[in-house]
């Protein structure tokens, strides 16, 4: 039974490139997701009336597929988190980001059966299933690049967001003080000023609230210019992060083709710091690359979420000593 459980895990685990069944399962799930999303979108059209039964059938079948997949992932979670107990691994998966996404992809289908009064609100949760597409990724895919850049630049982003928040609150209080007497119905309180400052600083400009006094208009011009600069700061930080990230990848590829590199085999001992860690969480040089893992009689082509286990032989491509 354990052998079959591990086999099922390898099949449903996203991104296994050397496993035909796993790749086929990936493509199958993607097709199911798109069919489900198409049915959800088409059901909002008036022309969908004659096809209600078909759309309901698609919703039923796809939700059952998502349910079975989720149950299998919970059942095989011990292989995803080998350092945890069986129960601990299952709990960890259920409350993980992708575990919650998996749950929310089919949960809205069942909730109206038990809570009919909230059917409309529960159906809105179906939009979350589109985030499952982020699971089809490789070691340097777009989603991992985004999360990597946000982690690396989090301090700068937090600082810029704090600056925007301070400017937003300050400008809202100033605008409220200037405009409240002239149009009390528009600037009723400080929150009305915050709504105006948010739409102005973030260059949205809904136009439902705007200054009418000369001082207020002059102040709005200044805030608009400051808003352009403030929004450009986090945008520039993220853009710079993307450039740095892809530059490192390009540099690493060129480096790997040089004569100063070699293959190394590293045996993972039970006390190793790499044991039970995912490759993307390892503290290794950007100019080193894990190209293969030998596990007993199995050869594994690694991904970012591949877990290193004790007694694995890790083949690395790195700088020659």
Image: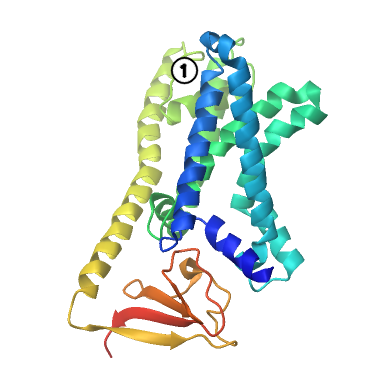
Where does the image place residue 309, in percent across and percent down from the top left? 56, 78
Residue pushed farthest left? Answer: 259
Q: Residue at x 63, y 65 (%)?
A: 4
Q: For label 1, count other residues whose C-alpha is less than 10 Å away and answer few (under 14), some (14-19) or many (20+).
A: few
Element marked by disc 1? loop
Report whether 39 appears left or right of 115. left
Report whether 23 appears left or right of 106. left
Where does the image place residue 57, in percent across and percent down from the top left? 62, 26
Q: Nearer the viewer, residue 91 or 70?
A: 70
Residue 92 higher or lower than 98, as above or below = below
Indicate the quadrant containing the C terminus: top left, top right, bottom left or bottom right: bottom left
Where does the image place residue 311, in percent across and percent down from the top left? 54, 85
Residue 91 higher or lower than 294, as above or below = above
Residue 98 visible, this orientation: yes
Image colouring: rainbow
Q: Residue at x 59, y 60 (%)?
A: 8
Residue 92 higher or lower than 221, as above or below = below
Indicate the quadrant containing the N terminus: top left, top right, bottom left or bottom right: bottom right
Report which quarter residue 318 is drawn in: bottom left
Q: Which residue is mark 1?
A: 206
Residue 133 visible, this orientation: no
Where does the image place residue 256, in percent across and percent down from the top left? 24, 74
Residue 101 higher or lower than 303, as above or below = above
Q: Residue at x 51, y 85 (%)?
A: 268
Q: Nearer the viewer, residue 17 or 100?
A: 17
Report which quarter residue 12 is drawn in: bottom right
Q: Residue at x 41, y 60 (%)?
A: 17
Residue pushed farthest right? Answer: 114
Q: Nearer the viewer, residue 17 or 306?
A: 17
């Amino acid at each position: 039974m354990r052998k079959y459980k591990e086999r099922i895990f390898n099949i449903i685990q996203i991104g296994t490139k050397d496993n035909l069944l796993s790749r086929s399962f990936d493509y199958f799930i993607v097709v199911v997701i798109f069919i489900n999303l198409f049915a959800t979108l088409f059901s909002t059209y008036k022309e969908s009336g004659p096809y209600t039964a078909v759309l309901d059938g698609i919703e039923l079948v796809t939700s059952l597929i998502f349910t079975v997949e989720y149950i299998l992932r919970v059942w095989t979670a011990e292989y995803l988190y080998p350092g945890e107990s069986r129960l601990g691994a299952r709990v960890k998966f259920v409350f993980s980001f992708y575990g919650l996404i998996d749950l929310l992809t089919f949960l809205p289908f069942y909730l109206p059966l038990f809570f009919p009064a909230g059917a409309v609100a529960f159906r809105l949760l179906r939009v979350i299933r589109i985030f499952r597409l982020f699971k089809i990724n490789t070691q340097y895919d777009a989603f991992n690049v985004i999360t990597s850049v946000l982690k690396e630049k989090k301090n700068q982003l937090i600082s810029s967001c704090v600056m925007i928040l301070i400017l937003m609150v300050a400008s809202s209080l100033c605008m409220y003080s200037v405009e409240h007497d002239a149009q009390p119905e528009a600037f009723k309180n400080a929150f009305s000023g915050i709504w105006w400052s948010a739409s102005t600083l973030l260059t949205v400009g809904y136009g439902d609230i705007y200054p009418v006094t000369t001082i207020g208009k002059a102040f709005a011009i200044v805030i608009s210019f400051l808003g352009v600069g403030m929004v450009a700061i986090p945008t520039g930080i993220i853009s710079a992060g993307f450039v740095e990230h892809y530059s490192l990848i390009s540099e690493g590829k060129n480096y790997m083709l040089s004569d100063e590199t070699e293959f190394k085999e590293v045996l993972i001992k039970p006390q190793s710091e790499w044991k039970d860690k995912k490759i993307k969480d390892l503290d290794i040089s950007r100019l080193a690359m894990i190209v293969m893992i030998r596990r007993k009689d199995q050869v594994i082509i690694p991904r970012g979420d591949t877990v290193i286990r004790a007694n694995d032989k890790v083949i690395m491509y790195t700088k020659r000593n």
